[in-house]
Image: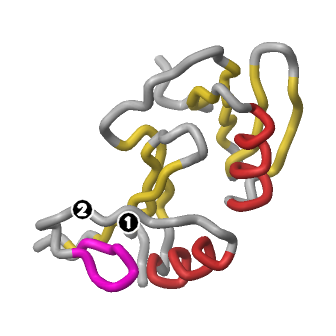
């Protein structure tokens, strides 16, 4: 029933001003609107609603991610914009913070201003 319908994704922020700068300026998502409840971005045809909350505790796992064809270039571009990539002990990440799994999938993680874990991966793309 919903397999052929557009999807929207949600993430929370207790600091909408920082979230707007991060998702809009640093990540390059198109800002659509803002109301008392959320910021709305267009993420390549997918609606991202950044919900305004008073308090939040970020999840200890990835909340949102992007498939990119050239993960190394994407990481470097985001680093130039001030995004810091996470390093996890024992994960075997390279100098950019990218882990390569045995099947060839690559992933790098970073956080938004509220501590939400976000990721880049090359899954389903061609490099």
Q: Classify 10 Å Cα crowding around label 2: few (below 14), some (14-19), many (20 and above).
A: few
| 8 shown above or below 30 | above
Q: Residue at x 30, y 71 (%)?
A: 106
Label 1 or label 2, whichever comes before in sequence order:
2
Q: Residue at x 45, y 76 (%)?
A: 71
Residue 48 vs residue 18, the one in the foreground: 18
| Quarter occupied by residue 55 | top right
| 117 shown above or below 49 | below
Going by the image, does 48 lie left or right of 62? right
Q: Position of residue 17 (x, y in %)?
A: 80, 38
| Quarter occupied by residue 50 | top right
Q: Position of residue 113 (x, y in %)?
A: 60, 45
What segment carries the magenta color? 93-99
Which residue position holds label 1? 108
Specify the principal SS of the magenta part. Answer: loop
Check contact, mark 1 vs mark 2: CB within 8 A.
no
Label 1 SS:
strand
| 66 shown above or below 14 | below
Any magenta on residue 16? Answer: no
Any magenta on residue 94? Answer: yes
Label 2 SS:
loop
Which residue position holds label 2? 88
| 66 shown above or below 100 | above
Going by the image, does 117 lie left or right of 87? right
Q: Residue 119: which numbered mark, if any?
A: none
Going by the image, does 107 lie left or right of 101? right
The residues tagged by marks 1 and 2 sit, at their Cα atoms, a distance apart of: 10 Å
Q: Position of residue 75 (x, y in %)?
A: 51, 75
Q: Residue at x 70, y 20 (%)?
A: 52
Q: Position of residue 37 (x, y in %)?
A: 76, 15
Q: Residue at x 61, y 71 (%)?
A: 78
Residue 72 vs residue 88, the one in the foreground: 88
């Amino acid at each position: 029933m919903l397999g052929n319908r557009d999807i929207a994704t949600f993430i929370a922020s207790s600091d909408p001003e920082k979230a707007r700068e991060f998702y809009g300026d640093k990540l390059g998502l198109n800002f659509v609107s803002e109301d008392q409840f959320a910021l709305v971005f267009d993420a390549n045809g997918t609606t991202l609603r950044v919900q305004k909350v008073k308090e939040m505790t970020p999840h200890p796992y990835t909340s949102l991610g992007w498939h990119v064809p050239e993960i190394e270039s994407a990481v470097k571009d985001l680093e130039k914009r001030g995004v810091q990539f996470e390093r996890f002990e024992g994960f075997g990440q390279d100098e950019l913070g990218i882990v390569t799994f045995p099947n060839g999938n690559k992933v790098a993680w970073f956080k938004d201003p509220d501590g939400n874990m976000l990721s880049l991966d090359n899954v389903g793309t061609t490099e």
